[in-house]
Amino acid sequence: MTALPDLAAGGLALGTLSAFALGGQLVRLRRRDARRRAEIAALRTQLDGSLRAFTSEVEHLAARRVPAAAGQVTHRHLDVPGPLQPLTADTPLGRSLDDVLVAVQSEVAAQRTRVDAAAQAGMRGATREIQAALYRLQDALRQLQQRYDDPELAQTLFALDHENEQSLRRAQVAAVVCGAWVGLAREESHLVDAVTGGQARLAGYHRVTVHNHLEPGTALVSHAVEPVAIIVAELLDNALRHSAPDTDVVVSLEHVHHGVCVTIDDAGLGMTEDERRRAQRLVAGDDPILLTDLGDPPRMGLAAIGRLTRQFDLRVDVSSASPYGGVRAVLRVDSHLLSRLDPDEKPPAASAPRTTRRPAPARPTAPAPNSGSGPTPAPAPVPAPAHGYDAERTESGAAGHQGPAAEDGLPRRRRRTASAAPRPVAAETRPPRRPEDAAAALGALQAGTAAARSAAPDPAEQPDDGTPERGGRGAGPADHDPRADRSAAHEPTDHEGGAAR
């Protein structure tokens, strides 16, 4: 009987202990659930903050960074702002956003190049038609110049031709910038002719002074003539536009180690450092040329120079200052683009400045050794015919070069003998006579005639002893020089004798 209460008490105690254990475990579970709920709430709050930060970064990317990156494609000086949160820079999110900017810039550059290529193709077609029309107009003007001899009409036609040449130059430069060929194929020409040809295409050509220090006969190969003329014209145009109208632009042509340099100095305002770097980048031709980079309205001169320097292996430098305070532009033509022309067979244009250099004298050739046993007798001296000024003085009897004196002390005229007559030169071997030679001969004739007249004594002061005098009234037919009469009858006027003077 005593065992039942003990068993009941033990069971009750065991149940109580189990209840306490289950209650403690339930409390622990509730605390753990509370902690987890708090962690979930914190994580949710953090996620919401991250989402708001990401949204802000994307909005900042779309509103600020992408437009700046697209603008940097055309304007390299623009800065692209960084992430909105500085801590995002080195995170995967920051790197992903930077990749987005790079992709945007690449696509913008590609589309910009494609659109600019289409615009250049359209402008090439338009300039081709304009050039053809201007060439036809040029031919018509030259035909009119050859047909009519009226001086006033000829002056008007020359002015119209010059205006047409300037319009043709602008169309040609636009075509070159758009990738077209130069449009003209010329034969080998003197380099000074190419320089003066570029000068003649400008409105202020009279302000350009050219100093030619090249060796006579320095020329350009055929495919480099027109590019050099275009480059010189554009460099001179920049120099004339950016300098005062009462100043000159000085051009010097010099030989250098690797070829020839054409140096252009102006007295303008010069360029800032940024402008100088941009100009040098354009004329170097290393970067692709886009029409949208040339301003509004587009300034195509330096861009055309850069295109030609890259195509024809020329060198242009505009990074230095002129000694006159402006800009110095140097065009270098390497030796492989140079040639040589005989200045006697094909002289430069009459309007081109003459070179300051003189051709080197020919070395005397050694006499051939005598193959015979005895000495070779020297040939009899043949009186060489006089040329130029000395010939006129000999024939005119100038003072200090008169014939032998008679017994009465009066000078006698030296008669020409048959042996002193010059040998006729075959027509095929006679070199062509240049205008300068004709002008020099005319001047020598006039000077000899004037010297002879001044040396002749006055007839009124001479005794009337019947002695014939040079230039006097008593000169007989044997002593009469018909060329003296022709020179006296053909007194030089300002127009005819200007070249001789």
Image: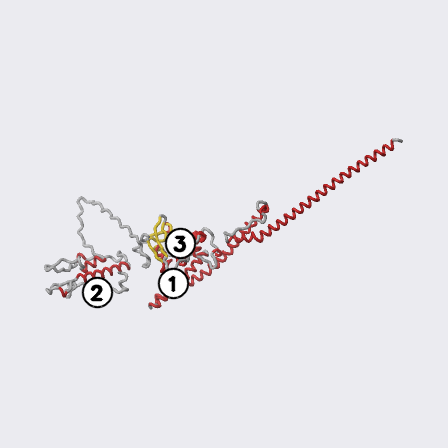
Structure colour scheme: secondary structure
Residue position marked by numbered label 3 in the rendering: 327
- The total number of labels drawn is 3
Check disc 1 and report its element: helix, strand or loop. Answer: helix
Residue position marked by numbered label 2 in the rendering: 488
Which badge, 2 or 3, comes first in the chain's sequence? 3
Which badge, 2 or 1, comes first in the chain's sequence? 1
Is 169 on the left-hand or right-hand side of 74? left
Measured from the top left, where is residue 13 in percent x and y? 82, 35
| Pointer 2 local density, CA inside 10 Å: few below 14, some 14–19, many at least 20 | few
Residue 366 seen by the camera? yes
- Nearer the observer: mark 3 or 1; the answer is 3
Q: Quadrant of the C terminus?
A: bottom left
Measured from the top left, where is residue 336 in percent x and y? 37, 50
Check disc 3 and report its element: helix, strand or loop. Answer: strand
Q: Quadrant of the N terminus?
A: top right
Query: Cα distance, mark 2 to mark 3?
Result: 54 Å
Mark 3 is on which residue type? Val
Which badge, 3 or 1, comes first in the chain's sequence? 1
Mark 1 is on which residue type? His
Q: Which mark is residue 259?
A: none
Measured from the top left, where is residue 474 in percent x and y? 14, 65
Residue at the far top in the pictured view:
2
Mark 3–mark 1 CB contact (< 8 Å): no
Task: Please name the residue shown 23% across and 61% down the image.
Answer: 446
Residue position marked by numbered label 1 in the rendering: 162
Mark 2–mark 1 CB contact (< 8 Å): no
Is 196 on the left-hand or right-hand side of 40? left
Mark 2 is on which residue type? Ala
